[in-house]
Image (cartoon, rainbow, N blue to C red):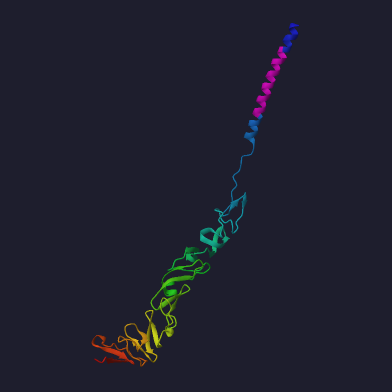
Amino acid sequence: MKTQWMRHQYLFVFGIVLLTLGFAGCEGDLSESEDEGPEKQRFECEGNVCLRNNECRNADERCGTGCLNCNTANNAREGVCKDGICEITACANYYHMAMEGADIVCKLNSFESCGKRREFNIVDCRDEINAVNGLCGSSGECIATSCKDRYHIVVGKCEEDTVHACGLTTNDCTKLPGWAEGVCDDRQCIATQCQKGFCIDDRTGRCVNGRGDGNACGTEGGEQVCQRCDVENDWWCENGQCVRCPL
């Protein structure tokens, strides 16, 4: 009995030893498997090429090692990728195309340097539309807010004054009372000839009724300048002539 019992104990201990060695062997195998497996390789592209999703490829939307979108990069609206470099073909709103050395760039518009998105023709709006102040619109158009002398604004543009459109309020001089001929000078309607019954008021340059009070007297029209009757000494205007009131 005792011998049989000892045999069982021996087998039990032997079994535990085997199990321990077996697990140790498994761990060693796993460790060796990890150590001996292939190392993870870093994926790289040759040259100025975009790497995205493990693919080396350039396109207008993914250009060069920076994977730039040529349609938006560097203030562009349109562009193409050539040899890993974005070449601009159109700029974003409020920008114009310009050259910096051999490169095409997009520069921010201003009133003094205004251009269109696809053109290299840059203008100074002050000279282009005879303006003093204004802005360069989103598409590169000059928009005036104030004009040089002898010009007035019409829908954001400065147009030269004429007798039909004179001054900031674009008066039509020919519609003024008694007007026959004249000019628009310094944004003012200035009469050179009046209709019959009117005379030229040399203080305002307008044609006034020559049968009025003593401050504007004359009805001959034409180039006649209004007389000023000496009303303080009893002179008055009668039928376009200064006459003295009877005592």
Residue 184 in sight in this render: yes
Q: Main secondary structure of the magenta part?
A: helix
Closer to the camera in the image, 17 or 196? 196
Q: How many marks?
A: 0
Q: Is residue 55 above or below residue 32?
A: below
Picture quadrant of residue 225: bottom left
Front residue of this view, candidates 202 and 93: 202
Magenta-highlighted residues: 9-28
**Is 146 displayed left or right of 241 in the figure?**
right
- In reply to whether residue 149 is colored magenta, the answer given is no
Picture quarter with the N terminus: top right
User: Image height check: is 227 above or below 72?
Assistant: below
- Residue depicted at 69% across the width and 21% down the height: 19
Along the line of sight, the residue nearer the viewer: 243 or 39: 243
Residue 124 visible within the image: no
Quarter holding the C terminus?
bottom left
State yes or no: residue 20 in magenta. yes
Q: Position of residue 7 (x, y in %)?
A: 73, 11
The residue at 63%/34% (across/down) is: 34
Q: Residue furthest top?
A: 2
Determine the image quadrant of residue 35. top right
Query: Between 133 and 40, which is closer to the camera in this rendering?
Result: 133
Question: What residue is at 67 percent from the left and 22 percent from the top?
Answer: 21
x, y percentage for residue 202?
32, 85
Q: Position of residue 146 (x, y in %)?
A: 41, 72
- Residue 86 appears left or right of 213: right
Whole-percent x, y for residue 198 in the image: 37, 89
